[in-house]
Image (spheres, grey):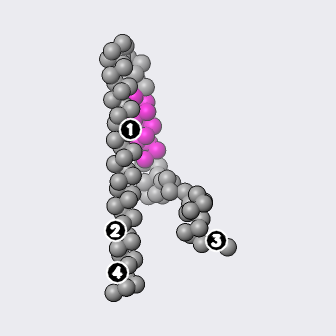
Amino acid sequence: MAGFIEDFYYGNVETQNYTPEFGNELKKKLGALTALEKQLSDRLTGEEKELFLIYVEKYNEFNSLSVADSFINAFRISSKFTYDMFVR
C-alpha cells in the first residue's frame, strides 16, 4: 500500500476539495459571483465589456497566486509544527 507522500507525488491526493464546513457556502458564493459576472458581461458593450473581461481575468490571476501563496505558507507553518513536535 502506498503512503501519503507517494500518493501525493503521483497526484492521487486531491488538494482542491472543499472543506466540508465551507463546501456548500463556497459553492453558493461561486454561483452568485458567476451569475453577476454574466449579468454584467451581458449588459456591457464595446470597450467597457473588454475592460471588464480583462479585469475579471487579472483578478482571477491575482486570486490564484494569492491562494497558492496561502497554501505554501500554511504548509510551511504546519511543517514547523511537525518538526518542533518530533525534534524538540
Residue at label 3? 2
* Residue 37, visible in the rendered structure: yes
Give the alpha-carbon distance from disc 1 to disc 3, as whole Å. Answer: 35 Å
Residue at label 4? 84
Residue at label 1? 60
How packed mark 2 is, by other alpha carbons closer than 10 Å (few <14, some 14-19, many 20 or more), is: few
Give the alpha-carbon distance from disc 1 to disc 2, as whole Å. Answer: 26 Å
Residue at label 2? 77
Give the alpha-carbon distance from disc 4 to disc 1, as whole Å. Answer: 36 Å
Image-based side of 6 in relation to 85, left or right: right
Give, as a three-letter code, the residue at label 3.
Ala
Residue in view at x 32 percent, y 17 percent: 48
Dot 4 or dot 2: first in sequence order is 2
Dot 4 or dot 1: first in sequence order is 1
State which quarter of the image contains the C terminus.
bottom left
Give the alpha-carbon distance from disc 3 to disc 4, as whole Å. Answer: 26 Å
Assess whether mark 1 and mark 4 are in contact (beta carbons under 8 angstroms): no
Give, as a three-letter code, the residue at label 2.
Ile
Q: Is residue 64 magenta?
A: no
In which quarter of the view is residue 5 placed? bottom right
Chain part drawn in magenta? 26-37
